[in-house]
Amino acid sequence: MPERKDYYGTLGVAKKATDDEIRKAYRRLARKYHPDLNPGDKAAEDKFKTVQEAYDILNEPKKRQMYDQYGFYSDAGVPGGGAPPQGGPGMGFEGFDFSDFINQQGGRRPPPTGGAGDSGGRFSDIFSQFFGGRETAQQQQPEKGADLEYSLNIDFWQSIRGTQVRLSISRQDACTSCNGSGSAGGAVATCGDCNGSGQVSQTAGAMKFNLTCSRCNGSGRLRNVCPACRGEGCTARMDSVEVRLPAGVASGSRLRVAAKGNAGRMGGDAGDLYITVRVEDHAFFKRDGDTIEIKVPITVPEAVLGAKIEVPTIDGRAILKIPQGTQNGQKFRLREKGVASARKETRGDQIVEVFLQAPPANDERTRELLRELAEQYPPDPRSELWTKV
Ligand SMILES: [Zn+2]
Ligand SMILES: [Zn+2]
């Protein structure tokens, strides 16, 4: 048989107590014996559990009825048959539905946290803080500074030849007044809001919640805040960063400049600076990887008879041999006249695409020659076309 417990006595109410009286008595006792208000007090903890158990039974009509009738309550149900009522007695917080509890209280919001100027979070916030509230404040641990991103535009020739650029960037640097500690030195005072515990209690209905103290961020101590950085340990300042871009740097390249991001906190490493390079288009040279592509016009006689022509390259002029019978749109490769690879010791090629330019026929002599040419070259260039249509 389960041991007999005096739940009414535990809560200090009469056997005929109303639900409301039971609830009030429970709230008063829960507040008094809550473990978070009596840290390390085993007796209070046991008392709290007893109060909790009594309330669990007496607050549930079916459980209270069984207790009244048999003098005990058991999850296993009534001796000699009968299904057990739903739900067991809650011990501690595990069986306790906080949200239901708050709803019973008319959805009351918890009071604001001390000194935070916050009008009180929603219940879920309180709830998560309640369970997460025991971790130590993160601000006291070294933290790596944030990486910074910078977008740098350079022109075509800067990308081909490489360049050196001086950037002005706004970054968080370690405060020079406090060397990044955020503290102005002197004695470290105990936080008055939490009496050094780093936690403050907050009431939500009959429950007390422990929240991380907002004044000291859970450290329990108050520093003399550095006036230069307001305790942040870093200050924003413009910094000049010299960046050398290698010859052949391509659009979209990302360069990392170590330790030129934001300063770390509490002695943490600085973040890095990442520079994304954008290369502006050139009016004539098109770049595809390490290959340079250009389009060059040639005359009909050059195409027909062949020629040596001068074409521009990124190095200057180069000779390109146009073979006899060159057609419109034909492409020629100039080896190693492309971009010096930023990664390898090689150079890309230049591809020259030629297009035929019809000669102007403003004079009779030119027209004569072309008519002669037409007689000399009678086949219809479209004859093959018709066989495919
Ligand atoms: Zn400072
Ligand atoms: Zn505090």
Image (spheres, rainbow, N blue to C red):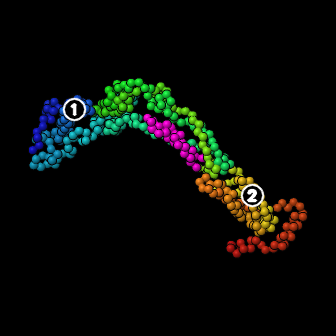
Above or below for 9 versus 62: above
Q: Main secondary structure of the magenta part?
A: loop
Mark number, residue 300: none
Closer to the observer: label 2 or label 1? 2
Extreme bottom residue here?
Answer: 387
Q: CA distance from mark 2 to mark 1?
A: 92 Å
> In this image, 51 relative to 252: left or right?
left
Amino acid type at circle 1 is: Asp
Please provide percent x and percent y for residue 47: 18, 33
The region drawn magenta spans: 253-278
Q: Quadrant of residue 327?
A: bottom right
Q: Residue at coordinates 75% horizontally, 55% vertically from top-left?
A: 317
How many circles with numbers are drawn on the protein? 2
Q: Which residue is mark 1?
A: 41
Check mark 2 vs ligand 1: CB closer than 8 Å? yes or no.
Answer: no
Q: Residue at coordinates 64% horizontally, 45% vertically from top-left?
A: 163
Mark number, residue 318: 2
> In this image, 232 relative to 28: left or right?
right
Q: Nearer the viewer, residue 148 or 357?
A: 148
